[in-house]
Every structure is written in C-alpha cells, then in structure tokens.
Image (cartoon, rainbow, N blue to C red):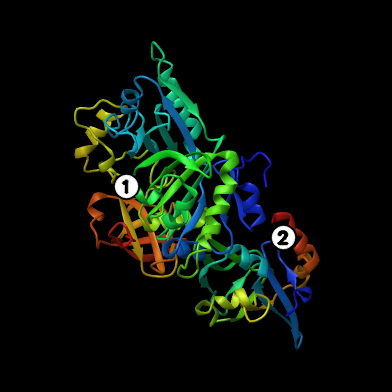
Amino acid sequence: MNAELAQTPLHSWHVRNGGRMVDFAGWSMPVQYSSLVEEHHATRRAAGLFDVSHMGRFRIAGEGTAAFLDRLVTRRVADLEVGQIRYALVCNEKGGVLDDVLVYRLAEEGGEPFFWMVVNAGNRAKIANWIKARLAKQSPAKVSFRDETAETAMIAVQGPAALVIAAPVCDANPAELDYYTGAVTQALGQWAIVSRTGYTGEDGCEIIVPAEAGLEVWEKVLQQAKTIDVPEPGVKPAGLGARDTLRLEAAMPLYGHELTEGINPLQAGLKFAVNLKDREFVGRDAIAGFQDDAAMLVRVGLELSGRRAARQGYTIFAEDRQVGEVTSGAFSPTLERPIAMGYVAREASRVGTPLEVDIRGRRESAQVGKLPFYRRKT
Amino acid sequence: MKPQDLLFAPTHEWIHVEKDGGKAVGTVGISAFAVEQLSDLVFLELPEVGRQVKAGESLGEIESVKSVSDIYSPVSGEVIEVNSGLPDKLETLQEDAFGAGWIVKLKVADESELDKLLDYAAYQKQCEEAG
C-alpha cells in the first residue's frame, strides 16, 4: 500500500476488521470487508455502515455567503432555510460539471449560521481552489472558506434499520429529520452534523463528527445493531464496492463516470438540480443553450440479458451504428443481472429500445431500462 | 489436490501435470487466493475444446460483481477438456479451487515451459507481497 495515501480516522479499524484497502482518489479506503454482495444485501435489508470520511467537507460562512453560493451552483440555494440540504452541481462556464455536491444551510447550537458543502474526494482540491479563486475577487472579503475534511469524520448509516441504530448515538433523532435536512447537534457528547441523506437508494443518515470521535461513533452504531432483530445478513460495515453497486441500482450518478467536465447537467438527466429562471450562476447561459440540443447524448440505464456486465468505456450499438458508451456497469446483487448506465444518442434513449454492448469483442444484447433500477418501498 | 503439488503462474493460475502414456496433460485452475480476491463470482467463460493456446494467452474470463479478469494459460498446449459444469456452479471455486474447481485440461506442448512457473512457496510469497 502506498504510504502517501491519506487515511481516514477509521483506517486502522478497517485494517483490523479485514477491510481490503485500495487507493481511491488518493485515500486508502476499504473496497469490501468480506463479500461485496453480502454488504450490499445488508444495506438493502438491514443496514450498512460506510466510512465516507474521504469526501470533502467545507464550511463557508459570513455575510453574503448565500448569494455567493447561489452564483456558484446550478440550483437555487439562497432560499435554503436553516436545516435544509440541496443536491446541486458546480459547473464551469461551458456548462460542464466540475462536481456534484450537497449544500447544507446550518446553524451552530449557539445560533451562528453557516453553509456546509460536501464534495467528492477526487474533486476536493479542484472545488476548493475554484471557490477560493472566486472568493479572492470579493471586496471587501466577508465570506470565509474552510476545508474541514481532515479534522472531521463522516459516517453514512444506510438501510431500513439505519435510523434505529443511529438514533441512540445522536442527540437530535435522525428519524425526526425530514429527508434532505440536517442539524448541528451532539453525537456521544461531541459536536456533530446529522443529516437524513445518503447515496444508496435507502433511507438513512450521515453523521459528521470531529475526527477523534469517529471511531467511537462507528463502534457504538455497530453495537446498537446487535441489540435489534434484523433480517439476514444483518448490519454490516460496507465498503466502496457495495456503495457503488447500491448507487448504481439507485441510478445515482458518480463523478468520473456519469459526470465529467465534458458532460452538462441536462444530458445527465439532472434538470431537477438546475434552476435557470431569474438566476445568474457559472455556466448558466451554456446550460440554457443545451435545452434544445437534439444532438446531445443523454444518460440512460441499460439492462443486459446475459451474465456478463457492461463496464465503463464499452461501446453501445443500435444495430450497426455506434450510439454511445457505457459509463458504469456491474452485476446487480438485488436484481441478479447486469445493469449499466451510459450515454446514447437521443433517438436510442427511449425505454425499451433494443441495443447491443460490445463486451470485450462480443456483442451482448441490452435494452434501455427505466431508471432507477431499484426503488425502495416506502 | 494439495497446493504444494502444483505449479503457479504469477497471474494466479495453477497447473498440475500428469503423464498419460508419453504425453503430459496439465489440469489448470485459478488459485484460492485469486478466488478470494475476486469474490462474488458471477460468470465464467470456458474455451472450446480443441483450441490451441500459447503460454500467457487468455483461456477464458472470470467475472465478479465488481470486475472481470482473464484466465491466462500457464503453458502452451491444446485444450482437451473443460470443466463444463463449473460456470453454473461457481461456488465450487470458493469451496475447492485446487480440486473440483479445475477449469481446463491441456495437452502440454512444451514441458520446458513448466520450469518458468513458481512452486507454491514462491507463489505464496508473491501473494503476501501483493496483499
């Protein structure tokens, strides 16, 4: 293992507990502990615990922050109330996606208001620099930026039993938070942000605590899991492998796959995260121009008929015509067949369209499927 | 079969050679270490009987939920038998990678190629360094 890799506050726990550590965006992270499929099923049926401390966490505060962020991201955030969280995109002037982020509006328990942003690990430096460059132009400087990634830990508890096992750890009961809201509270006596968010298609919460409290929170949630009855295979720590198959089934885009600087939010099917009307933000005019672009490839889901998965970079065909490329694919543990996402020409994007994917030299039949592949019963 | 009786390629395939008349026949599989690393297997593609392969050429592919890997032939030869029941019973690889989980039998073309393979101790050392 490369000694240069960053380690989360839970790193030694992962190593002690059989985590297979891999380099992910410069971090040493567990891809799985025992079986990816078991960790996946645990999350769908009971709960999975994910160390997501590698994700970037920024505190942005001061007079004018709301207006500043509103010009930075594709979605209106100036109107966020304290406690609300919104998924949004940071785009460049050409409308290409620099990152997909969560913007939180919060207030400390003493009342001090601030914004919080969670960004992808691989884009942390890029987005921090992007924000700082824009802040450098403000005069007088009132908005402050602080990268609090290293000093905090972030744990995602996801699945039908997630809120039950997380609740005893947090002063604010996550079950009483609405979906996509959060609060500054305490977890085991330490400062914490608890939010009803996640990246698995399941209900659940994410807990951010000071780095030194991370291990205690993690272990306490796992301990809680032993006190309740849950379906097999029970509550499990889950690695990046399961996180990827879970988000793929839930059709959530992953930066570097469905989102890149060469892709705009509209073709990615993220119109809900773009507010064009009466707003000025970086990339707005370019994105507005894509609204009528019939030539643009669009994101679709693919269902394959065999057992072989279509993976990133594989070419998609409609008869003999090359119509696009796969961006993510795996064998779906829930559906027990291969699923994928990719970009295809609009005329090949309708649900049910028969397509083929070149899987290492052999064409396998596929069809455009309805997204998400998996939706939890509510 | 005991792993100590096998030879290994650095790419995690094993071979066990027996003499059948004057001919050397090698049984080829993938190591228990490789099976564990792949985990959650979903698909195995076998070669056709009669196919000639060179050492290091792909014999087939094995796919897990997360990734796909080639199975490389440890030596040159002709595929004379495949474990045709294995793709439908991939758990056999988890249970007995060095026995019932064999993948193909090869008529070994050049026995001197066996000298380039690793014994179990050397292979284990490689795995420890990788793990």
For residue A56, above or below residue A20: above
Q: Residues within 10 Å of mark 2 (few under 14, many from 20)?
A: some
Residue at 59% in and 59% down: A33
Q: Nearer the viewer, residue A6 or B125?
A: A6
Kind of residue indicated by mark 2: Cys
SS at badge 1:
loop
Q: Nearer the viewer, mark 2 or mark 1?
A: 1
Using the rendered image of the protein, determine whether residue A213 is visible from the camera's viewpoint. yes
Q: Chain of mark 1?
A: A
Task: Answer yes or no: are tags 2 and 1 on the same subunit.
Answer: no
Read off the residue under disc 2. B127
User: Residue A322, how many percent across, how many down?
Assistant: 33, 54
Residue beneath disc 1: A178
Q: Between marks 2 and 1, how big is the CA–CA gap? A: 48 Å
Left or right: A247, with B96 as reference point = left
Query: What chain does mark 2 sit on?
Result: B
